[in-house]
């Protein structure tokens, strides 16, 4: 069954930052979507400034896996939408949280922590070496033992998240910092994958390994119960007879 993927991009930083505009003329979501071409997904691109902030019920209900990229307008995302997305994740919708989405309302609610981290942005970036620490995991399929992002924003520990279910990637930066850059979580019936690399002023979403990780993450996060159907309500069995 084709996985229906909705890429939600806040869509503001490409308008505010000329450097981001130059690197992502088609939007960050455009580069992410391009990287998913040929993977067999049904792709949809939406954003904060679309009607219903891009996720009216008919779109959210037709989403198997939601990708989230946001940075400067997390607070503008309506609490009602966050409630609906939260319930969708608990019912089995997959969620892939990219880069600065660590501070989105949805991710913080799902984690139950502030999700703060240490960070540093240099004009030319830091080298990020992403080590694959769980090579047997489906999200690591097709990856070398490590890959490098030549220009990256440093995201470092401590990363204020609960203990991940699985730690897949551990990043090292040229400043000596380390970061848990690939983590999975399960909430209700939903699967959540957080992936760190993806700063807006570097061409990270054109990196072949980054694209591989995102495609693998989508496949892993897809709901697998009941033939892939997302369950809106818990089944309430009748009391057992005596
Ligand atoms: Zn960033």
Image (tube, rainbow, N blue to C red):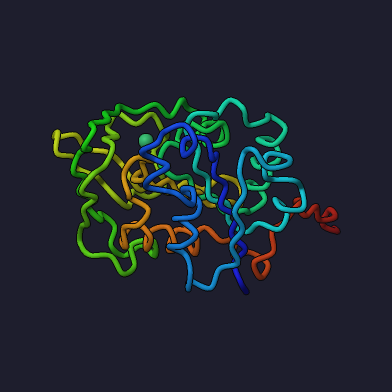
Instruction: State the image quarter where residue 145 is shown.
Output: bottom left
Residue 108, position in %: x, y? 52, 31
Foreground: 67 or 139?
67
Q: Is residue 52 above or below residue 150?
A: above
Foreground: 89 or 216?
216
Q: Is residue 230 left or right of residue 163?
A: right
Q: Quadrant of the C terminus?
A: bottom right
Q: Is residue 226 above or below residue 59?
A: below
Circle count:
0
Q: Is residue 54 left or right of residue 7?
A: right
Residue 92, position in %: x, y? 63, 54
Foreground: 227 or 147?
147
Q: Quadrant of the N terminus?
A: bottom right
Residue that appears at 33% across and 48% down: 167
Residue that appears at 52% across and 33% down: 104
Q: Is residue 2 left or right of residue 216?
A: right
Residue that appears at 75% across and 51% down: 234
Residue 91, position in %: x, y? 67, 50
Residue that appears at 60% across and 67% down: 42
Residue 216, position in %: x, y? 42, 63
Instruction: State the image quarter where residue 64 is shown.
Output: bottom right
Q: Is residue 55 above or below residue 210?
A: above
Ligand 1 falls in quadrant: top left
Instruction: State the image quarter where residue 173 is shown.
Output: top left
Q: Is residue 123 left or right of residue 140?
A: left
């Amino acid at each position: 069954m084709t996985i229906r993927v909705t890429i939600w991009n806040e869509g503001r930083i490409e308008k505010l930052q000329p450097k981001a505009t130059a690197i992502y003329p088609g939007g960050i979501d455009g580069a992410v979507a391009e990287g998913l071409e040929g993977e067999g997904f049904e792709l949809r691109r939406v954003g904060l400034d679309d009607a219903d902030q891009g996720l009216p019920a008919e779109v959210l209900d037709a989403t198997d896996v939601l990708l989230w990229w946001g940075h400067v307008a997390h607070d503008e995302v309506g609490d009602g939408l966050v409630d609906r997305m939260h319930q969708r994740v608990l019912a089995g919708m997959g969620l892939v949280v990219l880069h600065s989405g660590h501070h989105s309302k949805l991710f913080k609610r799902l984690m139950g922590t502030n999700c703060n981290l240490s960070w540093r942005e240099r004009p030319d970036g830091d080298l990020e070496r992403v080590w694959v620490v769980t090579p047997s995991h489906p999200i690591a399929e097709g990856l070398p033992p490590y890959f490098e992002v030549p220009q990256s924003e440093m995201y470092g520990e401590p990363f204020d998240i609960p203990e991940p279910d699985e730690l897949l990637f551990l990043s090292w930066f040229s400043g000596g910092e380390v970061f848990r850059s690939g983590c999975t979580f399960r909430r209700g019936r939903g699967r959540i994958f957080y992936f760190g690399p993806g700063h807006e002023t570097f061409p990270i979403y054109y990196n072949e390994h980054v694209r591989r990780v995102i495609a693998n993450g989508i496949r892993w996060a897809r709901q697998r119960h009941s033939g892939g159907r997302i369950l809106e309500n818990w089944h309430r069995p009748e009391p057992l007879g005596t």
